[in-house]
Amino acid sequence: MITLSTPVEQINKIGAATAKKLQRLEIKTAQDLLQYYPFRYEDYSQTVAIKDLKPGITANIQGELEFIQNKRSFQKRMMITEALINDGTGQLKVAWFNQPFIGKNLKAGDKVSLAGIVQGGFLGLEMVAPEYEKIGLGKLAHTTGLVPIYHVTANLTNKQARFLIKSIIGAASQFEDILPEATRRKYQLLDLAKALVNIHFPQSQEILIRARRRLQFEELFLLQLKTQIQKLEIKNQKSAIIKFFKEETNKFVQSLPFKLTAAQKKAAWEIIKDIGQDKPMARLLEGDVGSGKTVTAAIAMLNVALNKKQSALLVPTEILAGQHFETLAKLFKGVDISMGLFTRTNRKVVSLKSYDLQLDVSKEKLLKAVKDGKTEIVVGTHALIQEAVEFRDLALAVIDEQHRFGVEQRQALRQKSGNKLIIPHLLSMTATPIPRSLAQVIYGDLDLSIINELPKGRKKIATFLVPEPKRPGAYDFIKKEIANGRQAFVVCPLISPSDKLGVKSVEEEYKKLNEHVFPELKIAYLHGRLKPPEKEKIMREFLANDVKILVSTSVVEVGVDAPNASVMIIEGAERFGLAQLHQFRGRVGRSAHQSYCLLFTESLNEQTRNRLTIFTKSNDGFKLAEADLRQRGPGEVYGTAQKGFPEFKIATLNDYTLIKETKEAAENIASEGIEKYPKLLERIEKTGEYVVG
Ligand code: ADP
Ligand code: MG
């Protein structure tokens, strides 16, 4: 008997070869197979008499083959299978190309069921390459009703996928329905087994909608429930109260080489108010690239230090850590505090009152200073969490570019307060412009501060969609910029040409630019498959203006300051969401030099070109994200590299009604007490990364 844990190889008729193909889709057990949901359906629910067929309709036809034969086409290159089908009301011509096995499998006299689009051919109506199956071998699965279409890979066909799933669909009843009875009743949800059967083989459009809703509900509900539970856990914990040092803060703000924007002040004040309470802060600071999040966080860190407590600033790369350390050291110059830099390869300490900077500090020495509380602010990378860093009194954890970190990493940082009963206040920062409504789902119960204005006087980054014939002109332009001392980025969607045909890859593009377009310039490339030290080395060479052009995948999006770069070229721009494009663009324009962003696309799709044109006209990340979200899902808008974005099997973040219902349902369960629902608790503990805590 098939159980949910039966490995796919043991399912009847699955050979080793098919099992391998399934493995590639991460399908290992019967359960995986049943949860491999179709992404759309072909509607073959109209069974039409041949005499009533009209060109253009999609139909199912059932009748007897009068004639079938394979023959070679004129030029002999193609094998054509020709057939005639008769259903008693008329005759229809059918043809398949290069599938000679059809001519062998079927023979005149067979009763068959066909499905496809009816075409008005030269000599009357016909069907070209319809789906087909013999009648009389069991229930029809491929040619009538709503037929599921799966995201199959190369060698596995939809027909095989359907056949396999159908053969084990009975096991759907073994799934344990973890949704509480009352929840199911209140939201009128199908029971799980029924939903599973109907998501694969829906009897009607109506039941399909209900099946999909049931499965989506469960995913969103679990996500929300997890958030609710985290929220409750935090509620029972305390954080240090950080007293506001008004005078010192004013003095600091006045010492800055610029005036804070109103949005920065508002955000800083929200943070100050939060950390003034013993309830742990959990706040997300969103602000466009260059909006000045660092100094906003610095105000909070300053107050923590003045309270004789510690802050940690966690950043995703060594280079960025170094840059933040330097920036903050400049800002805090003269204040009576000490700051440390802690990365895998780089450790520094600076006493800011006398500006006494020590380079190459030993690990032991820095760890001790942090443990003794002598270093009030520690800037660092993952090393800060991974290694044996202990704080005396960590009161504030700031996470920069938070989408680069997973929940575990945030949790690990939280456990470093030096006191088990106290957790640090948490400030996450991101330049990803996520509208409030969406942020509430993804980030559950983080409070939100948004810096929605850029400092005055920033130059707009001139952005153009460059038509292919003007490419040489664009390269000439880059040459001029580089001759003037500037540098350029080139972003490509893929790493190597084999990743996907026809899309620009880093390796190809690097080769082309290096050998043919700019042979006289030093060019380097960067992508996620390089080891971190290699990446850092290349970034350093670029920052030193040694490398003039950096070709890379989206890894470049992280907030490194390369003020000398003035041109951002984006190849295959249609492959990125507007929010992501905006992040790339934010890599340039970080100094007084006028900067440029040039987009290339091979897409001729009008909608795509419109989307890109909108991008060339707006420099506002939030507006762009909102515009894009209206057309496409969050996954596409923000790219898949975002940690903390939930990965759903079937749910989407687009259905706000369902999101609201699931949130309400989760709140109800959480307030009743999750311990009353052991099955839910077990499931939530099993699902890993999801929500920000
Ligand atoms: P991001 O929000 O992208 O992290 P940063 O904090 O790195 O931005 O700030 C970008 C640059 O803007 C820095 O050089 C910073 O010193 C500067 N800056 C920050 N706030 C202001 C302001 N109010 N006016 C002018 N420049 C500012
Ligand atoms: Mg930043």
Image (spheres, rainbow, N blue to C red):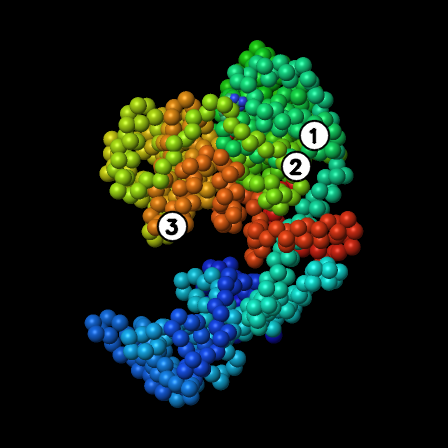
Q: Is residue 579 above or below residue 307?
A: below
- Residue at image coords 66%, 28%: 271
Q: Residues within 10 Å of mark 2 (few under 14, many from 20)?
A: some
Q: Which residue corresponds to mark 3?
A: 606
- Residue at image coords 62%, 28%: 267
Image quadrant in which you'd find residue 230: top right
Which quadrant would the N terminus be assigned to in this image? bottom right
- Residue at image coords 41%, 22%: 592
Q: Is residue 296 above or below residue 604?
A: above
Foreground: 321 or 124? 124
> Disc 3 to disc 2, how far (Cα)?
39 Å
- Inspect the image, locate mark 1, and give the three-letter code of the amino acid beneath it: Asp
Residue 10: percent from left, percent from top: 54, 70
Q: Which of the two discs, 3 and 2, labels the residue nearer the N terminus?
A: 2
Describe residue 292's horizontal placement relative to residue 181 as left or right: left
Q: Residues within 10 Å of mark 3 (few under 14, many from 20)?
A: few
Residue 124: percent from left, percent from top: 32, 78
> Disc 1 to disc 2, how far (Cα)?
10 Å
Judge depth for marks 1 and 3 and give the one in front.
Answer: 3
Q: Which residue corresponds to mark 2?
A: 447
Describe residue 500's horizontal placement relative to residue 201 as left or right: left
